[in-house]
Image (cartoon, grey):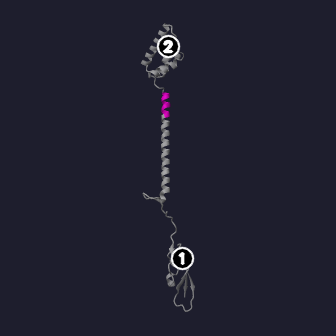
Amino acid sequence: MSDFVEECRREWKRLRVPDPVANEMAADLAADLEEAEAEGVSAEEVLGSGAFDPRAFAVAWATERGVARPRWRDRVRTRRLLSAAVVLLIILAVTLLAIAGLAIALVASTSGSTATSGTGPAVPVPTRTETAALVEAPNLIGLRQAAVQGAVVAGLVVEIAHRRRAGAVGKGTVVAQSRPPGSAVPPGSTLSLVVTR
Protein backbone atom coordinates (compact mmCIF):
# COMPACT_ATOMS: atom_id res chain seq x y z
CA MET A 1 0.00 0.00 0.00
CA SER A 2 2.97 2.39 0.19
CA ASP A 3 2.71 2.75 -3.63
CA PHE A 4 -0.84 4.05 -3.18
CA VAL A 5 0.31 6.62 -0.60
CA GLU A 6 3.22 7.72 -2.80
CA GLU A 7 0.89 8.19 -5.77
CA CYS A 8 -1.36 10.33 -3.56
CA ARG A 9 1.66 12.39 -2.43
CA ARG A 10 2.61 13.11 -6.06
CA GLU A 11 -0.93 14.22 -6.79
CA TRP A 12 -1.02 16.48 -3.73
CA LYS A 13 2.25 18.02 -4.81
CA ARG A 14 0.78 18.66 -8.26
CA LEU A 15 -2.29 20.24 -6.59
CA ARG A 16 0.08 22.45 -4.56
CA VAL A 17 -1.12 21.16 -1.23
CA PRO A 18 1.23 22.62 1.43
CA ASP A 19 3.89 20.10 2.49
CA PRO A 20 2.92 19.93 6.20
CA VAL A 21 -0.70 19.21 5.24
CA ALA A 22 0.35 16.66 2.61
CA ASN A 23 2.60 14.91 5.13
CA GLU A 24 -0.23 14.78 7.67
CA MET A 25 -2.67 13.41 5.09
CA ALA A 26 -0.13 10.80 3.93
CA ALA A 27 0.51 9.70 7.51
CA ASP A 28 -3.24 9.39 8.20
CA LEU A 29 -3.75 7.43 4.96
CA ALA A 30 -0.84 5.10 5.68
CA ALA A 31 -2.11 4.49 9.25
CA ASP A 32 -5.65 3.75 8.02
CA LEU A 33 -4.38 1.33 5.36
CA GLU A 34 -2.05 -0.48 7.84
CA GLU A 35 -4.85 -0.79 10.39
CA ALA A 36 -7.22 -2.17 7.71
CA GLU A 37 -4.57 -4.67 6.60
CA ALA A 38 -3.96 -5.76 10.20
CA GLU A 39 -7.68 -6.36 10.68
CA GLY A 40 -7.94 -8.23 7.38
CA VAL A 41 -10.10 -5.57 5.75
CA SER A 42 -9.44 -4.79 2.10
CA ALA A 43 -8.35 -1.32 0.95
CA GLU A 44 -11.50 -1.13 -1.14
CA GLU A 45 -13.65 -1.35 1.98
CA VAL A 46 -11.68 1.49 3.59
CA LEU A 47 -11.25 3.76 0.53
CA GLY A 48 -14.23 2.78 -1.59
CA SER A 49 -13.80 3.09 -5.34
CA GLY A 50 -10.84 5.41 -4.74
CA ALA A 51 -8.71 2.36 -3.95
CA PHE A 52 -8.34 1.73 -7.70
CA ASP A 53 -7.50 5.34 -8.66
CA PRO A 54 -5.06 6.98 -6.24
CA ARG A 55 -5.02 10.29 -8.16
CA ALA A 56 -8.82 10.68 -8.04
CA PHE A 57 -8.78 9.73 -4.35
CA ALA A 58 -6.06 12.35 -3.61
CA VAL A 59 -7.93 15.08 -5.52
CA ALA A 60 -11.22 14.29 -3.77
CA TRP A 61 -9.67 14.28 -0.30
CA ALA A 62 -7.64 17.50 -0.86
CA THR A 63 -10.72 19.24 -2.26
CA GLU A 64 -12.85 18.02 0.63
CA ARG A 65 -10.36 19.44 3.12
CA GLY A 66 -10.08 22.67 1.13
CA VAL A 67 -6.30 22.51 0.82
CA ALA A 68 -5.95 22.07 -2.94
CA ARG A 69 -4.92 25.24 -4.74
CA PRO A 70 -6.25 25.62 -8.25
CA ARG A 71 -3.74 24.88 -10.95
CA TRP A 72 -2.36 27.89 -12.79
CA ARG A 73 -3.99 26.66 -15.98
CA ASP A 74 -7.39 26.70 -14.29
CA ARG A 75 -6.75 30.20 -12.91
CA VAL A 76 -5.61 31.45 -16.30
CA ARG A 77 -8.67 29.93 -17.97
CA THR A 78 -10.93 31.58 -15.38
CA ARG A 79 -9.19 34.92 -15.85
CA ARG A 80 -9.50 34.63 -19.63
CA LEU A 81 -13.21 33.94 -19.35
CA LEU A 82 -13.69 36.89 -17.01
CA SER A 83 -11.64 39.14 -19.30
CA ALA A 84 -13.63 38.05 -22.34
CA ALA A 85 -16.90 38.69 -20.48
CA VAL A 86 -15.74 42.18 -19.47
CA VAL A 87 -14.67 43.00 -23.05
CA LEU A 88 -18.02 41.79 -24.40
CA LEU A 89 -19.89 43.90 -21.86
CA ILE A 90 -17.85 46.98 -22.83
CA ILE A 91 -18.52 46.38 -26.54
CA LEU A 92 -22.22 45.92 -25.81
CA ALA A 93 -22.35 49.14 -23.76
CA VAL A 94 -20.55 51.14 -26.46
CA THR A 95 -22.86 49.72 -29.14
CA LEU A 96 -25.95 50.60 -27.11
CA LEU A 97 -24.64 54.13 -26.53
CA ALA A 98 -23.96 54.55 -30.26
CA ILE A 99 -27.47 53.33 -31.13
CA ALA A 100 -28.99 55.67 -28.55
CA GLY A 101 -26.97 58.59 -29.94
CA LEU A 102 -28.11 57.83 -33.47
CA ALA A 103 -31.71 57.57 -32.33
CA ILE A 104 -31.49 60.93 -30.55
CA ALA A 105 -29.90 62.54 -33.60
CA LEU A 106 -32.59 61.09 -35.85
CA VAL A 107 -35.39 62.30 -33.59
CA ALA A 108 -33.77 65.74 -33.34
CA SER A 109 -33.41 66.03 -37.11
CA THR A 110 -37.00 64.99 -37.83
CA SER A 111 -38.51 67.11 -35.08
CA GLY A 112 -36.52 70.18 -36.08
CA SER A 113 -39.33 71.31 -38.39
CA THR A 114 -42.04 71.27 -35.74
CA ALA A 115 -42.70 73.65 -32.90
CA THR A 116 -44.46 72.40 -29.83
CA SER A 117 -46.13 74.24 -27.03
CA GLY A 118 -46.46 72.64 -23.67
CA THR A 119 -50.09 71.66 -24.18
CA GLY A 120 -50.96 71.65 -27.86
CA PRO A 121 -50.17 69.43 -30.80
CA ALA A 122 -47.06 69.87 -32.90
CA VAL A 123 -47.35 72.72 -35.38
CA PRO A 124 -45.25 72.58 -38.55
CA VAL A 125 -42.80 75.41 -38.86
CA PRO A 126 -42.08 76.43 -42.43
CA THR A 127 -38.52 75.83 -43.38
CA ARG A 128 -36.66 78.63 -45.10
CA THR A 129 -35.66 77.85 -48.63
CA GLU A 130 -33.13 79.98 -50.41
CA THR A 131 -34.45 81.38 -53.71
CA ALA A 132 -32.96 83.95 -56.00
CA ALA A 133 -34.03 87.41 -54.86
CA LEU A 134 -36.37 89.09 -57.31
CA VAL A 135 -36.08 92.77 -58.19
CA GLU A 136 -38.88 95.20 -58.82
CA ALA A 137 -39.09 96.74 -62.26
CA PRO A 138 -38.86 100.53 -61.87
CA ASN A 139 -41.19 103.01 -63.55
CA LEU A 140 -39.05 104.67 -66.22
CA ILE A 141 -41.91 106.08 -68.29
CA GLY A 142 -41.58 109.81 -68.67
CA LEU A 143 -37.82 109.93 -68.02
CA ARG A 144 -35.46 111.47 -70.50
CA GLN A 145 -33.38 109.06 -72.60
CA ALA A 146 -30.15 110.51 -71.24
CA ALA A 147 -31.10 109.38 -67.71
CA VAL A 148 -31.43 105.71 -68.66
CA GLN A 149 -29.15 105.28 -71.69
CA GLY A 150 -26.68 102.33 -71.17
CA ALA A 151 -27.50 102.09 -67.51
CA VAL A 152 -28.24 99.06 -65.41
CA VAL A 153 -31.32 99.98 -63.46
CA ALA A 154 -32.16 98.01 -60.28
CA GLY A 155 -30.25 94.94 -61.52
CA LEU A 156 -31.91 94.98 -64.96
CA VAL A 157 -30.26 95.46 -68.33
CA VAL A 158 -31.82 98.39 -70.21
CA GLU A 159 -32.28 98.31 -74.01
CA ILE A 160 -33.65 101.29 -75.84
CA ALA A 161 -35.71 101.23 -79.02
CA HIS A 162 -36.36 104.56 -80.76
CA ARG A 163 -39.61 105.67 -82.36
CA ARG A 164 -39.87 108.91 -84.15
CA ARG A 165 -42.91 110.91 -83.52
CA ALA A 166 -44.00 113.78 -85.62
CA GLY A 167 -43.42 117.06 -83.93
CA ALA A 168 -41.28 115.56 -81.14
CA VAL A 169 -38.92 118.01 -79.54
CA GLY A 170 -35.76 117.21 -77.59
CA LYS A 171 -33.65 114.19 -77.16
CA GLY A 172 -36.36 111.72 -76.39
CA THR A 173 -38.56 110.49 -73.59
CA VAL A 174 -39.44 106.94 -72.44
CA VAL A 175 -43.00 106.24 -73.45
CA ALA A 176 -43.22 102.45 -72.83
CA GLN A 177 -41.32 99.61 -71.13
CA SER A 178 -41.46 95.83 -71.58
CA ARG A 179 -41.90 95.02 -67.88
CA PRO A 180 -44.76 96.69 -66.04
CA PRO A 181 -43.64 99.04 -63.28
CA GLY A 182 -43.60 97.31 -59.88
CA SER A 183 -43.50 93.77 -61.29
CA ALA A 184 -41.02 91.27 -59.75
CA VAL A 185 -38.43 89.99 -62.19
CA PRO A 186 -35.20 87.99 -61.82
CA PRO A 187 -32.02 90.07 -61.62
CA GLY A 188 -30.17 90.44 -64.92
CA SER A 189 -33.39 90.43 -66.96
CA THR A 190 -33.67 92.75 -69.93
CA LEU A 191 -35.90 95.81 -69.65
CA SER A 192 -36.76 97.13 -73.13
CA LEU A 193 -37.71 100.79 -73.33
CA VAL A 194 -39.40 102.67 -76.14
CA VAL A 195 -38.17 106.21 -76.53
CA THR A 196 -39.81 108.80 -78.82
CA ARG A 197 -38.01 111.68 -80.42
Residue under pointer 1: 157
- Which residue is at 50% across, 39% downward? 88
Residue at the outermost bottom position: 167
Horizontal and vertical percent position of residue 156: 52, 75
Using the image, determine if residue 40 lies above or below residue 66: above
Magenta-colored span: 72-81
At label 1, which amino acid type do we have? Val
Residue under pointer 2: 46
Task: Choose between 82 and 115: the one closer to the eye.
Answer: 115
Using the image, determine if residue 173 lies above or below residue 49: below
Instruction: Give the distance between the C-alpha atoms of the residues marked 1 and 2, in whole angstroms.
Output: 120 Å
Q: Quadrant of the C terminus?
A: bottom right
Task: Choose between 11 and 157: the one closer to the eye.
Answer: 11
Horizontal and vertical percent position of residue 62: 46, 21
CB within 8 Å, label 1 to label 2: no
At label 2, which amino acid type do we have? Val
Horizontal and vertical percent position of residue 51: 52, 15
Which SS does the magenta portion mostly show? helix
Horizontal and vertical percent position of residue 160: 55, 81
